[in-house]
Amino acid sequence: MAVTTRLTWNEEKSLQKLLGNVSLSLLYKSSVHGHSIKDMLGRCTLQGSTVTVVYLHNTIVGAFILGHYPQKDGDLEKQTSSFCFSFKNNKTEITTAFLNTAPNITSEKLIFYSSDCEKIFYLIPHKNYVFISKLLMDELGVNHLPGISKYLEYEVFRVEGIKDDGGYIRRITGATKCRSVLLTYLRNYKPCADLVSEIHILLLGPVGSGKSSFINSVKSVFRGHMTRQAAVGSDVTSITELYRIYSIKDGKDGSSLPFMLCDTMGLDEKEGVGLCIDDIPHILKGCMPDRYHFNPQKPITSRHPAFITSPSLGDRIHCVAYVLDINHISSLTSDMVAKLKQVRKEVVNSGVPQVALLTKVENYHEVLQYNFLNMKKSMTCQSQIMEVQKILNIPISNILMVDNYASEWEPDPLKDILILSVLKQMLRAVDDYLEDLPLEKTD
């Protein structure tokens, strides 16, 4: 009978994605192959990079080792790239902690050390015990566990297709940690000054620039899987015909987060086609209802039955993002540039903050600083950034870059970081706007 893993399909896919779309091959399963270090080494020695997965009640923890398993009672001085991880939030969101020391194997234990040679994680297979230090528990977010726990099972997988590069492993763990920090920030976000309960971010841009795809990408990050709620397409005319105000839910059945993304019909260089410019002031003021059907040749009026005649500050738009395909900046026609400047004039008159969101950034791995805390302007994007700054006359610091999810079926931590980072920058711009709002405009 074939030996199968206890990992669910989603858990295994999450691990594979974390390591860079690798394959996992089950080498050892304690309940089948024996509970001793000798049994484990007999199947896992000289197998290349491995992942050890330990199953506890309601929690999974484990460790990745780059390169072969060490020899029993080997030299502790030899350092390698390894990290510990845990599954949480329905066992698909992974938290990692980077280690820079090789594990040590004795006749009874598999031990992982911190960089200062403190034992922080070890297994005692013949007793089914796992020890996790307080420091590591804090990093992995598993503080509910006792220091020493009885595990249900542990398994070892060979990792096939991994890059043999310690810097790459550090980058993986750094990306996972940065993604987790950004998610925590956005989940805990509350609008500045308590003037509104929800932030409305309006997306404006040419047909096919990626407005609806950005909405789907944000929703996918918080859902934990790909979603295609906002209609997208590649038609020469706008796929979006309705004004939509999309809430963002944290998880499938989670509560709505305090920011909403507003989708519009695409701008077209031709008159009478695409979003009607005269609709924009009504959108900015909060007069346009959700699901309003755009008419490219005629703007909404106060006679429309669903027109919001007395919008509150909470109904208004609090930030505008001009969404532009970075690959088509240089080919924007003079008519489209003129229309973007006309739109910008309406936005400036409203006083709300503006950012530019450049989509379809193919070299998005280059756009992130090594510590993932800041976006940098890749040399290959400099000319497009300067051109956008010239067209829209907004600060370069407000020109953000992202690569939306399009045909992917699984999330990518680096894409998630860019998506979450630009959302964080938008919300910070809104906070500055609300904080500086004159008292008479807060009513």
Image (spheres, rainbow, N blue to C red):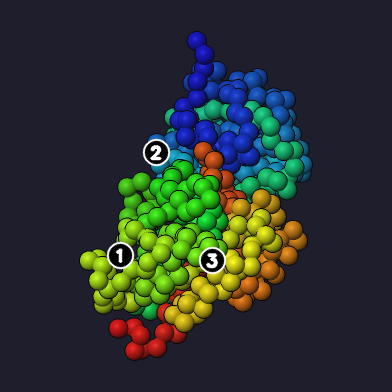
**Where in the figure is residue 171, as x and y percent of width and height?**
67, 50
Q: Is residue 209 above or below residue 110?
A: below
Q: Residue at x 66, y 55 (%)?
A: 327
Label 2 and label 3: CA atoms lie apart by 44 Å
Q: Which comes before the other along the chain, label 2 or label 3?
A: 2
- Name the quarter where the C terminus is drawn: bottom left
Which of these two is toward me, 160 or 101? Answer: 160
Q: Quadrant of residue 387?
A: bottom right
The amino acid beneath tag 3 is Tyr
Relative to residue 161, is residue 419 depicted above or below? below
Relative to the observer, which residue lies in front, 380 or 235? 235
The relative height of residue 128 versus residue 240 in the rendered view (above or below) is above
Q: Secondary structure at mark 3?
A: strand
Asked which secondary structure carries label 2, the reply is loop
Residue 96 x %, y % = 56, 47
> Residue 55 location, x and y as percent?
47, 33
Residue 244 image point, x, y percent:
37, 58
Mark 2, residues whose alpha carbon is within 10 Å: few (<14), some, or many (≥20)?
few
* Crowding near the residue tagged with mark 1, few <14, some 14–19, many ≥20 C-alpha atoms within 10 Å: some
Report the amino acid beneath label 2.
Asn
Proximity of marks 2 and 1: CB atoms separated by less than 8 Å: no
| Structural distance between the alpha carbons of marks 3 and 1 | 21 Å
Is residue 187 left or right of 393 when viewed as pictured? left
**What residue would you read off at disc 3?**
322
Disc 1: which residue: 289
Give the farthest residue toward the left.
Answer: 305
Q: Identify the residue position indicated by label 2 in the image.
A: 58
27 relative to 427 in the view: left or right: right
Comes first in the chain, label 2 or label 1:
2
